[in-house]
Image (cartoon, helix red, strand yellow):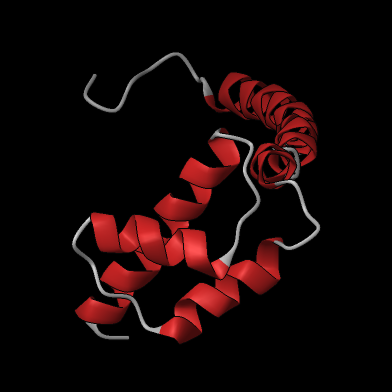
Amino acid sequence: MSADSEKQITAVAYASIILADDQLPITAEKLTAITAAAGIIVQPFFVNLFVRAFTGRNLDDLLLSSGAGAAPAAAAAPAGPAPAAKEEKKVTKEEKKEESDGDMGFGLFD
């Protein structure tokens, strides 16, 4: 994707957020007017893409619900290390047994 296309998409995205913040419907005319006022000429394809994506949807709900998917994954993450900690405890007990068996009263450099 070219830098110009990315700039156009970003401009339309910000224009969509502006309209949603003012609780106005997201229409092609309004998106084009906002981007033109910012001095950015946007291809109609990008404008229509955003209009279709947000027609009949509340942009606030979409933005707020996008972070909700990460919460269960974060909650599930602590469950993974707990069994590993138990394994480490077992290893340390085994290491202590090996250390006590290997201690013959002299060191390597004695």
Q: Quadrant of the N terminus?
A: bottom left
Q: Can you give x and y, in whole percent of width and height, for residue 110 in the image?
A: 24, 19
Quadrant of res 44: bottom left
| Above or below for 88 versus 73 | above
Percent across and percent down for residue 81 are: 71, 34
Q: Is residue 30 left or right of residue 9?
A: right
Residue drawn 32% across and 71% down? 8
- Residue drawn at point x = 51 percent, y = 53 percent: 16
Q: Tell me which residue sits at (67%, 39%) in the image.
A: 60
Residue at image position (59%, 42%) is: 20
Instruction: Let me know if residue 5 appears in the view.
Output: yes
Does 12 sit above or below residue 71? below
* Vertical arrangement, residue 46 with respect to residue 37, above or below: below
- Residue 90 visible in the displayed image: no
Residue 55 in the figure: left or right of residue 106: right
- Residue 77 lies left or right of residue 36; in this view the side is right
Q: Position of residue 39 (x, y in %)?
A: 18, 62
